Amino acid sequence: MNPSRKPLIAGNWKMHRTVSESVALARAVADTSRIGPRTEVVVAPVFTALQAVAQALVGTRVTVAGQNVYFEEQGAFTGEISAPMLKDVGCAWSLVGHSERRQLFGETDASVQKKLFALRKHGLAPIACLGETLAEREGGVTYDVLRRQLDAMTASLDAQEATALLTGLVLAYEPVWAIGTGRTAKSSDAQSAHAFLRDRIRDRYGEVADTVRILYGGSVKPDNAAELLAQPDVDGVLVGGASLDAAGFARIIQAAG
Ligand code: PEP
């Protein structure tokens, strides 16, 4: 971690937990975690539990994220949820471009960009996910994929617009082969990918790169979090499975300091 950026620990609960179970988990996270003075903590429950979880967390240091968002504000888009709707139920954040959305639900680089615009327009903070598949890593194209996914976020923007979008943005580098597999990236590989992303932003847009927080995601556990968080360009972690256990998630939060 670099002291100029606040550590961010995010839990993605995916399609797990009923409303009452989510509230209980959220309360357990807020009650048991010792959150360092500069650390930010976010949890992303299922849509049906967002409002109840947000209410349960009022007055705590844990904030709430959607797991996905649609880029239109309202209309005939059956099954979708918009940025103002996320805000309405108490979200401050939303994930976008998670690999499960890209792989299972047709999320594209172009739709990720539209979702970023929608979130920013409504004052929600995006956590924009990107990362290579196993085939891409084995094919030696990891950095081409990361460059393509990152550049797509600012495609067709002029430098001023791109800088505005990137200022304070949170990226989550999540190698797809590490998600839910128990196979974590080596901390040196995570650092290389994070440094690549930050350098790419710096090369194109300058100092705004230092304001971008880059989380690592992919089988983060209490036992490997500290080593990942010790890397200079790892500004936090996005945790799936291990965030469903409040005690384990609390240990990950503590690893951030
Ligand atoms: C995720 O869903 O973003 C994730 C990183 O999952 P896991 O920690 O279970 O690999």
Image: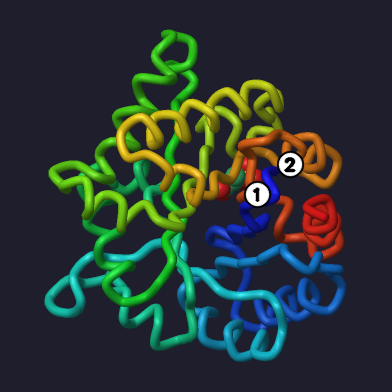
Residue at the image position 68 percent from the left and 30 percent from the top? 184
Place of residue 147 in the rendered image (x, y in percent of width and height, measured from the top left): 34, 28
15 is higher (above) or lower (below) than 189: below
Residue at the image position 45 percent from the left and 86 percent from the top? 89
Pointer 2 or 1: first along the chain: 2
* Marks 2,1: beta carbons within 8 A: yes
243 is higher (above) or lower (below) than 123: above
Outermost residue, top direction? 139
Q: How is the image coloured?
A: rainbow
19 is higher (above) or lower (below) than 32: below
Residue 24 visible in the displayed image: yes
Tell me the kind of residue under disc 1.
Answer: Gly
Residue at the image position 28 percent from the left and 36 percent from the top? 151
Q: Quadrant of the N terminus?
A: top right
Place of residue 125 in the rendered image (x, y in percent of width and height, measured from the top left): 43, 66
| Residue situated in front as seen by the camera: 239 or 233 | 233
Q: Quadrant of the C terminus?
A: bottom right
Left/right placement of residue 63 relative to residue 254 reads: left
Mark 2: secondary structure = helix
Q: Give neighbour class at mark 1: few <14, some 14-19, many 20+ (Cα, 10 Å).
A: many
The residue wearing badge 1 is 236
The residue wearing badge 2 is 229
Place of residue 185 in the rendered image (x, y in percent of width and height, measured from the top left): 65, 26
Residue at the image position 54 percent from the left and 29 percent from the top? 195
| Residue situated in front as seen by the camera: 187 or 135 | 187
Tell me the kind of residue under disc 2.
Answer: Leu
